[in-house]
Amino acid sequence: MMGELGGYGFRHDPMDFVENNQSAQAALVRAVVFGRPTPGDEERIEDVFQKVFANQNADGSLEDRHDQGVLAATGETLRNLLEAGCPPERPDVQRAVAALLAALDRLPPDKLSDVPCYAVRVLCELGLTDHPAINASLLRMAGEIPSQFGEGCPWTPFVQLNALWAGRHVADVSGAIEQTLAWAEQAVAPPGCSAALGLCVPWSIVLTVDTLDHPACERIARTLVPMLLRLQKPDGGWGEPETNSTLRAFVMLKKYGLLDELRRLPPLPPDWAVVRSIPVPCEKPWNIAWDDGRLWVHDAEACAAIAVSPDDGAVLQTLALPKKPGSTAFGAWDGAVWVLPGKSDQPEKTLYRIDPSTEQIREMSLGFSPRHFAGLVRVGGKVLIPDQWEGHVWAFDPADPSKSKTLRLAAGMPDWLASDGTAIWASDAWAPAIVRTNVGGELLDWGEHPFGWGGIAFDGQYLWAIDKKNQRICALEKAG
């Protein structure tokens, strides 16, 4: 047996999803993964294909919802269709393939190496590799891929790796494949996020281990099991039908013999135990922070900070915050409340410090412009502000906020932060994890999001989290 799985298996039996669920995703799993479609599955799957081809353009290209261009949009959609078992010989597919080939022919000579990875992959898989743009683009991706380790968009470098694998018999890209897999083995961690992975959608890694037949992929797949167990839905599947996540999860589990192995283990228990809970003091709590024995709650609707007792939730003070549009990074330390308001398209560069005893507001001008943020903490004399779509946090000395540097945390796409001034808990926006980390990016501990996406605080002993569904704030400790 390769690697340990932590001694726990599925919380919900995935075979219940396979055998009883009547969704299109279940039909795809039965047909593609198990080869055992049931009555009605053919119609369910055909309905999925028809919805895509209903938007096929007159030239054969497929819908481009994000203005990616024919090669990227049609290549990606076509790859997803083939993954779902759509026959390559189907006339609609052939029209889409013809649109890709026509788009290649329209490329100017100086753009032959710029074919997007999705189009390169699908054409390589179909054996349509005669156009010089395919070879040129494979070599370009092989040269660029090391620069995308932990960088780029949330799907890089794994979508490029899939294309290189598909084209490994077309161009000399084996070195880049081996280098990327060696990096991935070191970077992939059980929560599905890490400082090395940076800005990364963990499902892109699942798709890669589904696609490649390489010894490293089984080791990576086994590393991803704890993440996959926590992403599972109560129906036994993995949701997200628009991205084929359930299909991809089953492919990985069956390909590496994990399905039966995990079904034999006891169900994974919850990561967190509720020590106590207090009521939220407002209808729309955005974030929370801990300072000097108080829990501060950010009331987004009233633009206020509410101090409550951590014992019973009694309101101790209500503090007006600067009224600014957009989301707000919120924190509390050294007897003050701190906020950074702004919008992603209009980043704010002014940090506000509010003194609860006098309600006096002091402004600090930052030397940088974070665009996607929620948490705001102080650690070891530095203030940290996450910039989730950049895959890092900004760190600066509040005595001189004009100077800053960026740090990578074990949450590669950090949004909510909590700290007692020493330890850091960071929520990852893509992986199902809240991780305990440090400014060096080490993974020290982790657990699933206890109540989904939302603000967190840390008092040095307990992690606090907002349970919006039940309108409460809970003090949590690791279960077991």
Image (cartoon, rainbow, N blue to C red):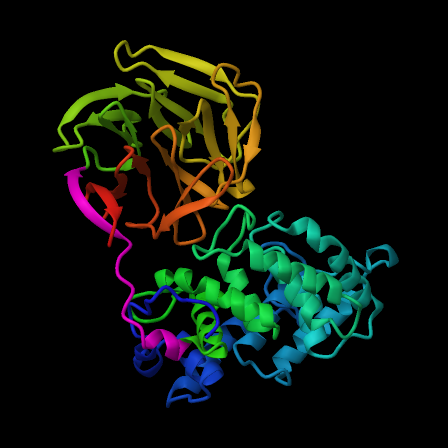
- Above or below residue 320? Residue 49 is below
For image coordinates 33% across by 43% down, the residue present is 454
Query: Is 341 left, or right, of 137 in this rendering?
Result: left
Count of all numbered marks drawn on residues in the image: 0
Instruction: Work out which quarter of the rendered image holds the C terminus and state it.
Output: bottom left
- Above or below residue 455? Residue 4 is below
Q: Position of residue 15 (x, y in %)?
A: 33, 79
Foreground: 254 or 415? 254
Q: Position of residue 351 (x, y in %)?
A: 45, 21
Please report the bounds of the magenta region as a residue range: 259-279
Query: Is 111 left, or right, of 265 in this rendering?
Result: right
Q: Position of residue 46 (x, y in %)?
A: 48, 81
Whether residue 71 is visible, yes or no, is no
- Above or below residue 403? Residue 411 is below
Q: Quadrant of residue 167?
A: bottom right
Q: Within the magenta stretch, is there residue 441?
A: no
Instruction: Work out which quarter of the rendered image holds the N terminus and state it.
Output: bottom left
For image coordinates 45% across by 52% down, the residue present is 430
Query: Is 12 left, or right, of 324 in this rendering?
Result: left
| Residue furthest out toward the right | 109
Q: Position of residue 477 (x, y in %)?
A: 25, 45
For image coordinates 38% across by 67% down, the residue present is 238
Q: Within the magenta stretch, is there residue 262?
A: yes
For image coordinates 61% across by 75% down, the residue present is 213
Whether residue 264 is visible, yes or no, is yes
Q: Quadrant of residue 67?
A: bottom right
